[in-house]
């Protein structure tokens, strides 16, 4: 592969040292011209910061500007030492390059380097040439619509944006229109009807996963409405959204940001937005009969996670700690639910949920996995009839495009369209799930003892295979359905005794009978669904984020984290 032609090559000064600075359409680099030469006396520059050779991709340069002489501004009105020689008072013209540099744990930081030029004409040439190269990066946003949720997480969304994000956007010459939401679904409703999306290159949400879900629902609904697509029809092929979404994490878990960027850091997310990264992700539509319910981006859970969410909603006054409390309570309740799960396996080349490698930036499966048209999918009626005769058996004819059916008692049914990794669970619910391969990983937790279920939950926090249990099965699917039959309380637990304590779910009409609720609730990205009988379909690459997926191994050649040539 031929190297791109060199645009500029000059010898410039950087902190009392001479550097050979080069620029082409791909890389901006500087290399010390006289590495063995001693520094000038009195210089307090840290040699370790820029010693040797360094390079920055042009696509990760944020801005370039002429550097003003700050020494005179700082010392106005003060006594000055009279220079012994005229050249001591001379300040050569300089320009500063702001760029994104990689830090540890997938974080990015905003850094800068200032070069001094021998004359003003050369300084302006460098500035104009670099600005011209940046203008050729057409994927970068110039105007953004920003929604801030001031109530999510620790209620720090507005402060995070104003102090950490807005200054970076301003430096990169990105104009923004900011809306601070005043109620639930404010952003969703505004995007559906009022927002003039043609004015913007992207939509940014400052908040948690709930705020992101609002943006997703608003944009997808707007796109389908403008395209004449009926969202209530489960068989419809949805139209992908053209506008990208940026996430500035300011919530409790920030699962989406963690799984697509690798860190819950506002500055990192802001830098991905500025450089114009694009990462498509799958969306799962959820229907009850012919009625649209919600879109799911990360977790669609029934049983354990549904019960946990339902209980935690009653304790919002506790803040994020409500999830810990409700999690313990739901675990001790240990309810299992009987029902029927039918699903359409992803039979083409999409990998397996138990693969050792994970979805990363430039993932092969996400780039090449095809989408199976709905009209080519058929249910095997004969196998469904056979299933009615055998409980907990699985129909498997080995034919393509055939639905499989599983009946049984489940502690949890989870469908995840991404790993669902977060700081508390670095691997997530399905470590090998892909962001944009057109599938979701369906995880079935069959009835088991509390101890076994605890072992399964603990594996979310370590490196052991969380699917390596006889009561756990996982399938990579394109569509699935669920119908609840009834709930059966675990025989290990005396419900009559539980009814007197904290963790009881005894029927109010018959407090002495020990019967429990008939079914659980579906949790869809932190929101409960009104129906238990659902059908879910995966829509491949329906939206795009300002992200690039998690990168494998950031390179650290020096203390700044900048790649060395």
Image: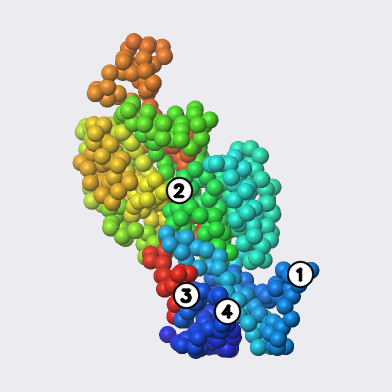
Q: Residue 395's image quarter?
A: top left
**Quadrant occupied by the C terminus:** bottom left
Which residue does the image show at 31% across and 33% down from the upper left?
411
State the CA–CA distance, disc 4 to disc 3: 17 Å
Which residue has dot 3 on it? 48
> Which mark lies nearer to you, 1 or 3?
1
Element on which disc 4 rests: loop
Q: How crowded is mark 2: few (under 14 residues within 10 Å), some or many (20 or more)?
A: many
Which residue in the structure is indicated by mark 2? 255
- The vertical placement of 334 against 124, above or below, is above
Question: Of discs 4 and 3, which sits in the foreground?
Answer: 4
- Residue located beneath label 1 in the image: 78
Q: Is residue 43 left or right of residue 493?
A: right
Dot 1 or dot 4: first in sequence order is: 4
Residue with the mark numbered 4: 42
Q: What element carries label 3?
A: helix
C-alpha distance separating marks 1 and 4:
22 Å
Using the image, determine if residue 331 lies above or below residue 494: below
């Amino acid at each position: 592969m031929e190297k791109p032609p060199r645009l500029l090559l000059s010898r410039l000064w950087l902190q009392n040292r001479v550097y050979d600075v080069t620029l082409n359409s791909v890389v901006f680099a500087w290399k010390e011209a006289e590495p063995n030469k001693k520094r000038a006396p009195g210089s307090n520059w840290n040699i370790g910061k820029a010693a040797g050779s360094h390079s920055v991709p042009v696509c990760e340069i944020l801005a370039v500007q002429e550097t003003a002489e700050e020494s005179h501004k700082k010392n106005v009105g003060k006594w000055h030492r009279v220079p012994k020689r005229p050249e001591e008072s001379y300040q050569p013209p300089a320009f500063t390059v702001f760029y994104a540099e990689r830090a540890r744990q997938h974080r990015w930081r905003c850094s800068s380097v200032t070069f001094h030029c021998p004359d003003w004409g050369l300084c302006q040439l460098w500035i104009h040439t670099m600005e011209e190269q940046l203008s050729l990066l057409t994927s970068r946003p110039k105007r953004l619509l920003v929604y801030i949720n001031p109530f999510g997480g620790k209620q720090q969304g507005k402060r995070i944006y104003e102090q950490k994000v807005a200054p970076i956007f301003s430096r990169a010459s990105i104009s923004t229109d900011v809306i601070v939401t005043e109620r639930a679904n404010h952003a969703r409703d505004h995007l559906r009807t009022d927002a003039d999306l043609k004015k913007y290159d992207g939509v940014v949400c400052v908040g948690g996963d709930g705020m992101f879900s609002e943006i997703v629902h608003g944009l997808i609904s707007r796109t389908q409405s403008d395209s004449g697509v009926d969202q209530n029809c489960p068989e419809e092929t949805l139209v992908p959204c053209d506008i990208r979404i940026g996430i500035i994490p300011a919530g409790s878990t920030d699962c989406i940001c963690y799984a697509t960027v690798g860190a819950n850091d506002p500055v990192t997310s802001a830098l991905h937005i500025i450089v114009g990264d694009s990462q498509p992700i799958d969306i799962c539509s959820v229907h009850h009969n012919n009625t649209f319910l919600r879109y799911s981006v990360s977790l669609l859970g029934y049983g354990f996670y549904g019960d946990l969410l339902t209980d935690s909603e009653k304790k919002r006054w506790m803040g994020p700690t409500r999830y810990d409390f409700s999690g313990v309570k739901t675990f001790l309740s240990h309810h299992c639910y009987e029902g029927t799960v039918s699903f359409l396996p992803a039979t083409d080349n999409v990998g397996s949920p138990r693969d050792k490698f994970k979805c990363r930036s430039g993932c092969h499966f996400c780039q090449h996995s095809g989408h199976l048209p709905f009209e080519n999918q058929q249910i095997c009626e004969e196998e469904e009839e056979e299933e009615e005769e055998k409980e907990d058996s699985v129909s498997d004819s080995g034919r393509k495009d055939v639905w499989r059916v599983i009946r049984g008692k489940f502690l949890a049914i989870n469908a995840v369209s991404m790993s669902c990794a977060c700081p508390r669970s670095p691997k997530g619910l399905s470590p090998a799930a892909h962001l944009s391969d057109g599938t979701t990983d369906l995880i079935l937790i069959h009835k088991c003892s509390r101890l076994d279920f605890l072992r399964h939950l603990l594996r979310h926090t370590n490196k052991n295979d969380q699917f390596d249990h006889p009561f756990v099965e996982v399938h990579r699917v394109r569509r699935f359905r669920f119908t609840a039959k009834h709930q059966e309380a675990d025989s290990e637990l005396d419900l009559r005794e539980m009814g007197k304590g904290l963790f009881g779910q005894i029927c109010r009409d018959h407090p002495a009978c020990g019967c429990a609720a008939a079914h659980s609730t579906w949790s869809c990205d932190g929101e409960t669904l009104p129906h238990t009988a659902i059908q879910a379909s995966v829509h491949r690459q329906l939206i795009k984020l300002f992200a690039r997926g998690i990168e494998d191994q950031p390179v650290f050649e020096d203390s700044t984290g900048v790649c060395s040539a």
